[in-house]
Image: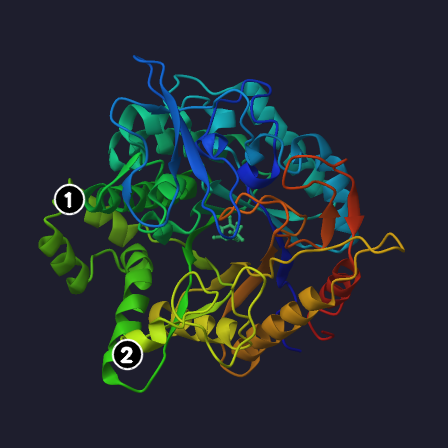
Amino acid sequence: MSFKKDFLWGGATAANQFEGGYNEDGKGLSTADVMTAGTYETPRHITWRNPDTGETGFSELKFGGGKFVPEGAQAAVLDGEYYPSHVASDFYHHYKEDIKLIADMGYKTYRMSINWSRIFPNGDDETPNEKGLEFYDHVFDELNKYHIEPLVTLSHYETPLNLANKYNGWASRKLIDFFVKYAKTVFERYNGKVKYWLTFNEINCMDMMPFVAGGLLDGSVQNRAQGAHNQFVASALAVKLGHEINPDYKIGQMLAYGQIYPYTADPADQFKALKQMDDTLFYSDVQTGGHYPASRIKYYEREGVKLDDKPEDYELLAKYSADFLSFSCYTSNVVTTHEDVGQDAGNLQIGVKNPYLKTSDWGWATDPYVLRMALNTLYDRYRKPLWIVENGLGAVDEISEDGKIHDPYRIEYLRENIASMRDAVTIDGVDLMGYTSWGCIDLVSAGTGEMKKRYGYIYVDRNNDGSGSLKRIPKDSFYWYKNVIETNGESL
Ligand code: BGP
């Protein structure tokens, strides 16, 4: 036996990339709804309007901080533009069919997110939108019908747009109260239907993608630091509240785990890699340990960051850490201090090309050790149960002449990754609760907004330009993964 008998096999999606129905049944706009599509080469854009002058425009959604709309403007949906989140894979109207398909695969769990702006359309409303609540009632009932445990992310890359425009998103402490009210509403409403929860998807992405992760229109270092702090506090409060509402709730934190390798044995490269790992792990250090590491405090001092914090924030952080630590992990990156190597970076967006690894069409390296590295690092550092909630290969799939989708590249990627995860469990003794691979049914890419970058076991007939019938077709990997689940990971 390798995996626990009750190991939670499944797949993962996020509302803004999968659900569509962006303005149906009272849903408000979210930050994802004003993001256009990009490609591998060109970044996505945020569209905006200046309410006083009527001027409109686009701002690049590039990695890092900065101002995402000009002074006086607000992020807004513009007529005639294409926004991938508006229809996405249309789970809103296909949920019964989709849940039946994942039940056919034998899923034990399904990770999804609630679209906050479906429940509180403006984020700061007095009362929730009943129609929005009903939608998730139907989804959870359908999952429960097939004995599939929902794993529900409260905030996955979407913040009600009004909160971004009015308060600069998570840079404001007011968001803590709005979020806690939203969490209370759904914790109470779905008590008995949901047991597993996650607070913030990839909380550490606040640094790299502050608009996406926190609705920050102004992503200065100060605002990103405050945004992260406010999410830490909100997450701890959600853990506290969730357990008060139902002591059996299991509430997890969620981190984007990026394995960083040094390119050479030069100590300068080694140190650079170490520091870059620390930048990621700072978030889980705070969420599990309750205090900021010294290096982060120094960094904030150097940058002139002044946190709007309170002594009780740290009490909350120390006392209400999550029940488990979940993470996404797709690839590894290489860094170096040697500029001549850096010049040769090849097709990678971040870092240097690893000469030992193949890369996907989007430049992500397939690393047969990365899950084992991640699981060992996180388990040794935090001693908390772990859950891999995202992993997978984004690839271009074609429908063959036989009408099927043959995706051996995806099976190969998953086979290597699941084997790596199995070694971490059986050889290294890591406590792993589950595995939900990313985008189990094709959906919109968060990074590029494309439909073409597919992760699913189930194909969705929809193209980058929004054309397509939305028909679902199981790929070869569908049958392969079904067998993996059936044999509890014995047969890969
Ligand atoms: C993670 C996000 C997901 C998802 C995934 C794949 O960072 O949590 O929302 O999309 O990455 O990334 P991409 O869609 O850019 O390929």
Kindly tell me whether residue 249 is visible in this rendering.
Answer: no
Looking at the rendering, which quadrant does residue 323 occupy?
Answer: bottom left
Q: Please, what secondary structure does the residue beneath circle 2 have?
A: helix
Q: Within 10 Å of the Cα at label 1, are there few (<14), some (14-19), or many (20+) other Cα atoms?
A: some
Q: Nearer the viewer, residue 92 or 302?
A: 302
Q: Which residue is mark 1?
A: 307
Task: Give the answer, above or below, for where 81 lies relative to 332.
Answer: above
Q: Nearer the viewer, residue 58 or 249?
A: 58
Looking at the rendering, which quadrant does residue 241 occupy?
Answer: top left
Task: Give the answer, above or below, for where 158 lies relative to 302.
Answer: above
Q: Within 10 Å of the Cα at label 2, are there few (<14), some (14-19), or many (20+) other Cα atoms?
A: some
Q: Residue at x 33, y 61 (%)?
A: 280
Q: Residue furthest right?
A: 402
Q: Residue 369: image x %, image y %? A: 51, 77
Q: Residue 81: image x %, image y %? A: 53, 27
Q: Residue at x 53, y 30 (%)?
A: 189
Q: Which residue is mark 2?
A: 269
Mark 2 vs mark 1, CA separation in Å? 31 Å
Amino acid marked by disc 2: Asp
